[in-house]
């Protein structure tokens, strides 16, 4: 099976069959990263541009490693400033990049919809590496891959996502993906962190951490952005940590074999206590490892790979 | 130069007329309306034109008082790359508008009489349509200090508005209403609580949740609609509310009117035509402020138009150049051009049975004239000969390439339209003609 779309802009538009294809493909790449010589010739002679217009370490590095392990030439463009500040529009940037004939463009942008604008402008496949509060499809795919490999399935699992849902592209992509794969998704956060009518995405909504994680198979803790305090989304880090931190005590409400996940970077002691982050339930570093495989799979598939 | 429009269906809400009539124009004024105004009495032969009389057969066409847009942005001075008084007037004439009121958020801001005089000079040069300048409420649109209302009035401003920005300071709004009312001038309020709308770029809703865009809640508008109504009620003045977009606003205005508060309101075609669902592909030409709302809001607006809660259909014509729009959605400027699409979109309201012909024409001519206190919006004998002739059956397709406006930021590119202004007469002179 091959991927029948040019771009990967979000999980919303993917079918369950496409998600399975990507995860199955990713699993075949896992082993490559454990070799001494971590390289396949698959994308030799291909060029991948990582256009990161918002600060990122983990995702950018993961994409770069994924490209390199497939023998592609990867070029990173990093800028924490928007294209507007830089004085060149995103459209002009896109046209210039397109003129250099890359094979894939990966984009991270602080504005929701920016990858869609790029994808309309260029003929090359575009992969969304996170756009504003909209979607972060590769994160959701690596999360689903982690769940599937640890639990053997996704169907019927209770997944609790806790934190600043309103601001989280990770939450949105995971809600779309996990629901498609048959999981039961619950979310929690203070009302200021819950976007309007979120229940219409098919999730159960709670305002307390304890209610959401009760009996959960999976707990995903979201990173708190400290700048959100200025918008009065939460009063203080102290209060947030007191009432929404996953710790060694409240985690007992979850299933005994619960998996604890976090998209990183983690704020130790704020949304997750160090003992839980480093503890036996944590699969946070497995997520990172799977991230490389998932991105290898996507690069492979959008360039026409697949049986 | 005289003009005789023969055999059209004349709809003139100012005197409750809907009848087949001939209209004779002399010396820039409506000379008379009547059945079969005789050609011979004017000494005219069969060819249609003799001497200084031009006869135009408008059978099967609608003849209405020249359309008036109470709310548009002509961008001059300061933003001539988006629009000028010349190009905006061309767009207006093509859309059937004989008069427009242009908002004050220019550069420099229209907050003193030298800008009024500049605008009037440009209008005189273009000699196309009537342009009525709206001056700002506050100096520099800063929401701090009142502009010189009396001086601006004497210079030719017809109303005051900080449109584009809300007047957040309630005390300033109170004083503006009082001072303006005492000199017989309308105040037009842009209702938006800027703290609540914050950095929102679309309606706050499930669609915004899915798109990951920050929302402007409907209550940001409704709070200020309620505030301005309470201020007008308390100070025993009047207020006109610009671009109403939510069901809640309609309800608050309806209640206020029932209590006898002197409040009038407008909405725009995009609010009763489009919804937030059109934003799903992040099209910047769907970005407006106030934002496109839900289908429930759209229905409530239609109900408000039907029952008279909303008095006026305005365009909120807001030209923006490609450079303002072809960027990431959240950076894109808010606003769409509307002068050339307002009429056909509004005609749909009659076709759908929302309003009657008389209601519609009143909302696009007589009512805005009444609110602005300008002697327009009527075909009574002696009135200025501002006339729009509409072909209800003319089918056409909106194309950004053929718009007269300097900017092409229409959300209706490619839309099939039915109905078009085919003749625009201003002061007895033909300014746009497609027949």
Image (cartoon, helix red, strand yellow):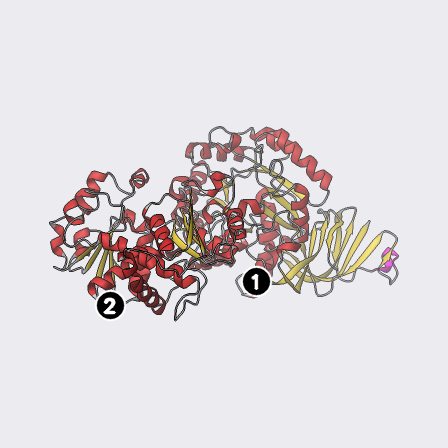
Label 1: how many Cα within 10 Å (few below 14, some 14–19, many 20+): some
Q: Position of residue B175 (x, y in %)?
A: 47, 31
Nearest the viewer among A78 and A246 is: A78
Nearest the viewer among A249 and B36 is: A249
Q: Position of residue A95 (x, y in %)?
A: 54, 50
Q: Is residue B307 visible?
A: no
Q: Secondary structure at mark 1?
A: helix
Q: Position of residue A30 (x, y in %)?
A: 28, 60
Q: Is residue B219 left or right of residue A32?
A: right
Q: Residue at x 55, y 39 (%)?
A: B186
**Label 2 is found on which chain of the structure?**
A
> Where does the C terminus of chain A fall, quadrant-wise?
bottom left
The magenta segment is B39-44
Q: Residue at x 47, y 43 (%)?
A: A83
Q: CA distance from mark 2 to mark 1?
A: 49 Å
User: How many labels were placed on the picture?
Assistant: 2
Label 2: how many Cα within 10 Å (few below 14, some 14–19, many 20+): some
Q: Residue at x 82, y 55 (%)?
A: B54
> Where does the N terminus of chain A fall, quadrant-wise?
bottom left
Which label sits on residue B94?
none
Q: Is residue B247 visible?
A: yes
Q: Hey, which quadrant is residue B150 in on the image? A: top right
Q: Is residue A172 left or right of residue B394?
A: left
Q: Position of residue B122 (x, y in %)?
A: 69, 37
Q: Is B40 colored magenta in this rendering?
A: yes
- Residue named by callout 2: A155
- Residue named by callout 1: B348
**Label 1 is found on which chain of the structure?**
B
Nearest the viewer among B352 and B105 is: B105
């Amino acid at each position: 099976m091959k991927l029948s779309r040019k771009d990967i802009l979000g999980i919303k538009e993917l079918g369950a069959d496409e998600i399975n294809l990507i995860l199955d493909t990713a699993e075949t790449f896992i082993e490559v990263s454990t070799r001494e010589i971590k390289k396949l010739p698959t994308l030799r002679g291909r060029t991948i541009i990582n256009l990161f217009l918002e600060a990122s370490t983990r995702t950018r590095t993961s994409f770069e490693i994924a490209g390199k392990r497939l023998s592609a030439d990867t070029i990173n463009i990093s800028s924490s400033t928007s294209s507007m500040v830089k004085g060149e529009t995103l459209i002009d940037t896109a046209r210039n990049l397109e003129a250099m004939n890359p094979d894939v463009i990966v984009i991270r942008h602080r504005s929701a919809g920016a990858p869609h604008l790029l994808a309309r402008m260029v003929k090359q496949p575009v992969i969304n590496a996170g756009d504003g509060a909209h979607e972060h499809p590769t994160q959701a795919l690596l999360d689903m891959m982690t769940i599937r490999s640890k639990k053997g399935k996704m169907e019927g699992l209770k997944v609790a996502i806790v934190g600043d849902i309103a601001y989280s592209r990770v939450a949105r992509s995971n809600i779309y993906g996990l629901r498609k794969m048959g999981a039961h998704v619950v979310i929690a956060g203070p009302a200021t962190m819950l976007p309007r009518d979120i229940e219409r995405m098919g999730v159960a909504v709670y305002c307390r951490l304890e209610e959401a994680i009760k009996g959960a198979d999976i707990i995903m803790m979201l990173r708190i952005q400290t700048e959100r305090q200025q918008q009065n989304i939460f009063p203080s880090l102290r209060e947030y940590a007191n009432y929404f931190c996953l710790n060694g005590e409240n985690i007992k409400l979850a299933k005994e074999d619960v998996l604890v996940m976090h998209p990183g970077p983690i704020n130790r002691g704020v949304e997750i206590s160090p003992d839980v982050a480093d503890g036996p339930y944590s699969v946070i570093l497995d997520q990172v490892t799977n991230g490389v495989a998932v991105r290898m799979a996507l690069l492979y598939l959008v360039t026409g790979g697949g049986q | 130069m005289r003009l005789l429009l023969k055999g059209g269906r004349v709809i003139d809400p100012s005197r409750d007329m809907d009848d087949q009539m001939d209209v004779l124009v002399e010396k820039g004024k409506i000379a008379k309306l009547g059945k079969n105004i005789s050609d011979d009495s004017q000494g005219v032969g069969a060819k249609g034109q003799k001497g200084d009389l031009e006869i135009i057969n408008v059978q099967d066409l609608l003849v209405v008082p020249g359309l008036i847009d109470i709310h548009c942005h002509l961008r001059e001075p300061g933003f001539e790359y988006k629009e000028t008084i010349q190009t905006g007037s061309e767009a207006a004439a093509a859309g059937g508008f004989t008069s427009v009121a242009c908002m004050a958020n220019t550069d420099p801001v229209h907050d003193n009489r030298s800008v009024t005089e500049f605008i009037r000079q440009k209008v005189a040069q273009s000699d196309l349509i009537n342009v009525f300048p709206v001056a700002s409420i506050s100096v520099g649109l800063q929401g701090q200090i009142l502009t010189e209302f009396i001086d601006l009035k004497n210079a030719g401003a017809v109303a005051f508005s900080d449109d584009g920005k809300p007047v957040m300071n309630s005390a300033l709004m109170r004083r503006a209403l009082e001072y303006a009312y005492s000199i017989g001038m309308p105040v037009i309020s842009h209702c938006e609580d800027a703290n609540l709308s914050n950095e929102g770029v679309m309606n706050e809703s499930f669609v915004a949740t899915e798109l990951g865009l920050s929302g402007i809640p409907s209550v940001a508008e409704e709070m200020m609609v309620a505030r301005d109504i309470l201020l007008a009620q308390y100070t025993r003045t009047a207020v006109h509310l610009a671009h109403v977009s939510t069901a809640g606003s309609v309800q608050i205005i309806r209640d206020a009117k029932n209590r006898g508060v002197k409040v009038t309101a407008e909405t725009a075609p995009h609010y009763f035509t489009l919804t937030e669902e059109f934003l799903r592909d992040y099209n910047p030409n769907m970005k407006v402020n106030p934002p496109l709302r839900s289908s429930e809001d759209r229905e409530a607006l239609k109900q408000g138009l039907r029952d008279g809660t909303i008095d006026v259909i305005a365009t909120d014509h807001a030209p923006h150049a490609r450079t303002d729009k072809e960027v990431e959605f959240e950076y894109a400027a808010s606003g769409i051009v509307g002068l050339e699409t307002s009429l056909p979109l509004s005609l749909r309201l009659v076709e759908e049975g929302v309003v009657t012909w008389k209601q519609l024409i009143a909302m696009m001519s007589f009512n805005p004239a009444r609110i602005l206190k300008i002697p327009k919006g009527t075909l009574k004998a002696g009135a200025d000969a501002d006339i729009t002739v509409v072909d209800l059956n003319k089918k056409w397709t909106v194309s950004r390439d053929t718009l007269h406006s300097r900017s092409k930021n229409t959300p209706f590119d490619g839309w099939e339209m039915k109905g078009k202004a085919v003749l625009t007469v201003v002061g007895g002179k033909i300014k746009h003609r497609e027949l």
